[in-house]
Amino acid sequence: MEIKCYRAKEEKAKMIEELNLNSDVSANYESD
């Protein structure tokens, strides 16, 4: 039960991280 919850949290964090990376990449290209 706990492990499942942890896994779900990890998945969510990974998705958010990827979204952030995607938006950061375009922003970084602008400033670079």
Image: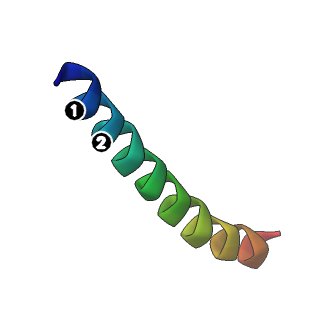
Neighbor class of circle 1 (other Cα within 10 Å; few <14, some 14-19, many 20+) is few
Going 60% across and 60% down the picture, which residue do you hit?
A: 21
Q: Secondary structure at mark 1?
A: helix
Going 35% across and 35% down the picture, which residue do you hit?
A: 7
Q: Position of residue 27 (x, y in %)?
A: 64, 72
Going 68% across and 68% down the picture, which residue do you hit?
A: 25
Neighbor class of circle 2 (other Cα within 10 Å; few <14, some 14-19, many 20+) is few
Q: Position of residue 10 (x, y in %)?
A: 39, 38
Q: Which residue is mark 2?
A: 8
Q: Is residue 26 left or right of residue 23?
A: right
Three-letter amino acid code of the residue under disc 2: Ala
Going 35% across and 50% down the picture, which residue do you hit?
A: 12
Q: Which residue is mark 1?
A: 5
> What whole-number distance in Å separates the C-alpha atoms at marks 2 and 1?
5 Å
Check contact, mark 2 vs mark 1: CB within 8 A. yes
Three-letter amino acid code of the residue under disc 1: Cys
Tell how many labels: 2
Q: Residue furthest left?
A: 1
Q: Secondary structure at mark 2?
A: helix
Q: Residue furthest right?
A: 32
